[in-house]
Image (cartoon, rainbow, N blue to C red):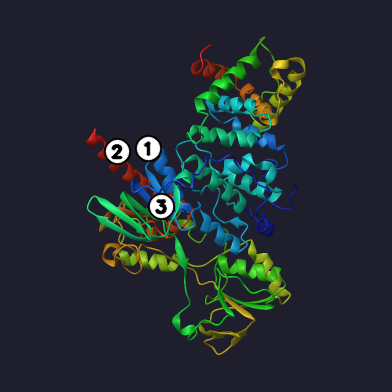
Amino acid sequence: MSERYDTIFSLPSVDDDPDTEVGVLLMGLAPDRLLAGLGVATRDPAADPATVTLLVDQLRHDARPGLTFSDAVAAGAQRWRVACEGSVDLGSGTRSAALRQLWESTARAVAAAGDEFPQLSTNGAAERVYLTACWSRPEEITKIAEECCPT
Amino acid sequence: MTTFVPHPRVLRSPRHRDWPRYPEPANDEAATLPEVADVVIVGAGPAGLAVAAALWHLGIPDVVVLDRTGKPVSRFFERVDRLEQRVLRSPYEHHPGVEGYRDCELRDFARLHWSLLTPIERREIRMSQAGHRSVVPVDVFEAYCHHTAAIHGVTGRLWRRDVSSVEPNGERVTVRGADFRIDAGQVVLCLGEERRDAPGNWWTGTRPEEIGYWDETVPAGAEREVVVGAGLTAAHLIHNALDRGARVEWVMRGENERYQCSDVNASFFRAEGRARFDSFRAPVPWADRLALMGRQRRASVMFEFRPLFEAAQADGRLTVHRGTDIGAVHAKGVELTDGRLVSGDHTTLALGTVPSIGGGLMSDELVGARDGWPDLDERTLAYQRAPRVFAAGAAACMVLGPAGRNIDGHRVATARIAATIAARVHEKAAVHV
């Protein structure tokens, strides 16, 4: 969006893909929340990333009968292990201190790899976004997956 | 110097857009209202919601919330919608959620719904992220309140009831209504504010139908409307009337319109501002607080209205009458004390609000009202003469300053109240182990 004024500094774009805004936000969440989100998203391909994120918030507060946060983390850990099978290497991509650039490059890499590696193909927007978020911090995610749900 | 030009377009934020309805935990409306509870919260507005959420995090599950509407923050949004208000001038940092527990906060909640926001609304978020003043769309705030209520179990512990009395009795407090009685360990009154009525000498007998208050419907077809008041409510009434094509006469006692970027109470949001009221560190004489409240709690209008109103004045659709008291209000309009008659088809009064301080529920002796404010323990916000009953919201203004009535003030009040309640409940539990 162009502005006629305020020339002193510029703010981040407001026109980026909404998934980028959500993705940047997810990059700041604790790894167990990302795994839980991945688990919820895998179970519900029709869900959007915002719905999954808020549902995980409900699970963290024990506000949903029938599903616990631990269940969701376990489901996410399982999905993560599948994604990592075969030591998939997406390359280093663009490593940037700019979170939006980092997100977009990771999202492109994960999407492109989905064509080559079936375990990285996703069934819905939320699964894609959460898998990307996990892939942006693979060591942390693998570690927490092992801690929460040992193989 | 950076000059921020207000966006009048923020005032056009969409309302009631197709916001996703997230799966909410079931609310068993048929559930029996408990007869005993650790805590009863009276009022499920922003303050009540904040208290309930904080108690959840402090491990106090046995909470009953009573509200006249039976829905969280319902009356708040009813008022907002009556005024056709589209944004709150509270910044994104002010919300009824809980800090310190990594809950989803309001700004992140808005960012999650990026695709639903207009470019103007997104820009406001960017301004907030950059540390600048921003405003929050009502749609965002409403959805966030529902989310906060859902995750903290408020929805399932909220009953639609009118409370008629709160009776401290030793270590317990009895909360009564027409068809219920609850034996509570502690009670938090989150009563909000009621509209301020006109002085008794403005008309005699029954109020003419051509005179209304801001929370009443303006009759369709009014072509010339008189609006009395100087605050944000008056501004919305004027804005709406102009939108309908009416001519507006704006009557205010002040010498000038007071346009502000944020709430008039903003200078009291921070701890150093509150310290001007709060005797937490050093005593602040009551007279000094009263004087500060008189000076600082002045009506103001979001500056986004300014270009709209100036344009309306320039083309004759809006006339502002400043600096004169009102002698009378009648069917033909408003008589000023200097003899002028400001005429209109309908006059709407927006004279501010009066905090509900607990009178009517508790005896005057227990409320201990002084100059219209309750006698509260400043560290806990408990009533001095009813230490198991607390006040949050506008009633706490003489402790927390004018910001006590703002959402940010609710959170400060909540922190003190919830910590006190939790300490007592946990202490009692430890004794019984």
CA distance for labels 2 and 1: 9 Å
Q: Residues within 10 Å of mark 1 (few under 14, many from 20)?
A: few
Which amino acid does the dot numbered 3 rest on?
Answer: Glu
CA distance for labels 2 and 3: 32 Å
**Which residue is farthest top?**
A86
Picture coordinates of residue B404, whole percent (x, y): 42, 57
Which amino acid does the dot numbered 2 rest on?
Answer: His
Q: Which mark is drawn over residue B426?
A: 2
Which amino acid does the dot numbered 1 rest on?
Answer: Gly
Residues at marks 1 and 3 on the same chain: yes
Instruction: Name which quarter of the figure residue A141 lies in.
Output: top right
Judge whether residue B431 can be spotted in this image.
yes
Q: Residues within 10 Å of mark 3 (few under 14, many from 20)?
A: few
Residue at point 30% right, 41% down? B425
Check contact, mark 2 vs mark 3: CB within 8 A: no
Instruction: Name which quarter of the figure residue B86 lies in.
Output: bottom right
Residues at marks 2 and 3 on the same chain: yes
Residue at point 65% right, 53% down? B16
Instruction: Name which quarter of the figure residue A102 lies in.
Output: top right
Q: Chain of mark 1?
A: B
Q: Residues within 10 Å of mark 2 (few under 14, many from 20)?
A: some
Q: Nearer the viewer, residue B175 or B278?
A: B175
Would you say B4 lies left or right of B416 here?
Answer: right
Quick one: label 2 or label 3, which is nearer the N terminus? Answer: 3
Picture coordinates of residue A5, whole percent (x, y): 71, 53
Picture coordinates of residue B105, whole percent (x, y): 53, 42
Would you say B196 lies left or right of B313 here?
Answer: left
Quick one: label 2 or label 1, which is nearer the N terminus? Answer: 1
Q: How many marks?
A: 3
Pick the quarter of the image with the C terminus of chain B.
top left
Judge whether residue A91 can be spotted in this image.
no
Q: Which mark is drawn over residue B59?
A: 1
